[in-house]
Image: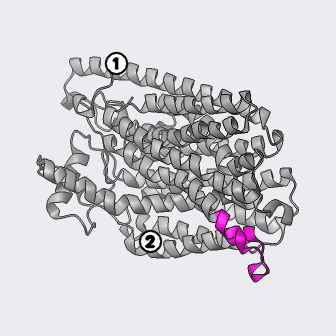
Amino acid sequence: MLRSQQDFPVKEDINIEKGARSSLETSSGADVVADSVITGRVWRKLDYHILPIMSMFYLLSFLDRTNVGNARVAGLQTDLGMSNKQYCIALTVTYVPYIVSELPSNLVLKVCCTISAVGPHLMLPTMLTLWGIVTTLQGIVDSYSGFLACRFFLGLLEGGVFPGLVLYLSYFYPRYKMNTRVTLFFSSASLSGAFSGILAYGIIRMDGVGNRPGWSWIFILEGLFTFLFGLSSYFIFPQSLDKTWFLSPEEKNYVRGKLLEDTHKEEEVFNWKEVLEALKLPQLWLLGPAFFFAATILFGLAYFSPSIIQGLGYTAADAQLMSVPPYAVACVVALISSFISDRYRCRGVVCIVSVLLCAIGFAMFLGSESKRVQYGSLFFSVTGAYMAPPTQATWNANNASPQTRRATVIAMGFIMGNSGGILATWLLGSLSPAPKYTKATITLLIFSLLAALFCALNMLYLRRSNVRKAEQRKTMNREEEAPGLGNHSAWYIYNL
């Protein structure tokens, strides 16, 4: 039976970064206000000021990376003379630097948090501004080689965004509040799928304006917006808990208390030993394959859903528009599932249900010849695809500590996940012919079931670890335990 989070005696093990929260080490004695009024007010303020910015960052990241699928339907591939193989190579070129940059970017962000002058409030907006420029340049290229160069630098600049945002949120929220927040900004990815279709439907009608094809205006207009938002984010990005302008001293003390209660003293500076320790965690390698399988599904649908819908008999313009409803439904369902995951701390169950929804969708698409049923299958597969990653990311981050270890497992999770993006580009791009995509659909169906299996294995391992820790707590006091154990501590309860 699922129980509300209040029923669990979970000890939070949250490390507070020295730079991002510089005065936290002196506030362990801060009075934690029990008043429910301040509780609601504090989290609402943080949500109001932080989550919209995070959501816009990830929306633009996903939009600028995947709008190539809309541009393809609008004539990009034909105008640049690309074969299906060359198109797949272009998408792969995006993911190689994207994957390579994820771990270094997260570790650099961790180090930068000790230097307030170059913290995440500057690093993340700089990445956003630069990839906005690259996105815009995609709209003026007139050769395949120029397009490849743009895709390379786009991947390089975007690589650290999602893991960086997850790490940044952990500076403000305790573990049990993370899934809803991560899903709130990740849901912007599904919104980007909806907006991308709507925007492309309107923008391609600019075909011929300035002697440029309609697909080029998709890149130019969306890239310019990203660039302008990137510039504005320098002024609106909260630097740290200590320097938030919207919280009173009492409210800051409350958040500090929530983050510090029941914690061990952890490292305050970057430590390579913790990087290596993170790579030894069984839960990372049990959840890693699930990251890969779920991400292959996600990116396959993100890049090719307009082409899939066009293959059902819709025109290029109508295919852009018909891609909107599945993504809108996915956004709503993902938010509901995140609330359930946080409320009942059932990360694993939500992950399993999400990939089983994908399996249902692929089975429908594969087993029916009806165009309506095949289109309806997208409501299952797209919804499941956008439910899984934020819950997996939160689950992964929740079960590693201290912060260098956590930053490493977050980045490693996304490295394994985005590796699936490379497979997805080839699986639907050239290895499985349209419009049925039979080989791809069978593969993604199998991946859905395998993802569910690895999530279940991870749940089993974490549950057994919690039982073992409970036995350890019966035989010793917390003061007797060696310091610096992080998630290996008997008082660190894994989230299931």
Quadrant the C terminus occupies: top left
Which x, y percent locates residue 312? 75, 44
What is the quadrant of residue 18 in the picture? Answer: bottom left
Amino acid under disc 2:
Ser
What is the span of residues highlighted in magenta in the rendered image? Answer: 200-218
The residue that mark 1 highlights is 468
Question: Residue 233 shows which numbered tag?
Answer: 2
Which x, y percent locates residue 169? 38, 53
Up-down relation of residue 288 to residue 208 (above or below): above
Amino acid under disc 1:
Arg
Q: How is the image coloured?
A: one colour
Helix, strand or loop for disc 1: helix
Q: Nearer the viewer, residue 421 or 202?
A: 202
Residue shown at the point (60%, 37%) measured from the top left = 381
Residue shown at the point (35%, 66%) measured from the top left = 239
Q: Horizontally, is 87 left or right of 105 in the view?
A: right
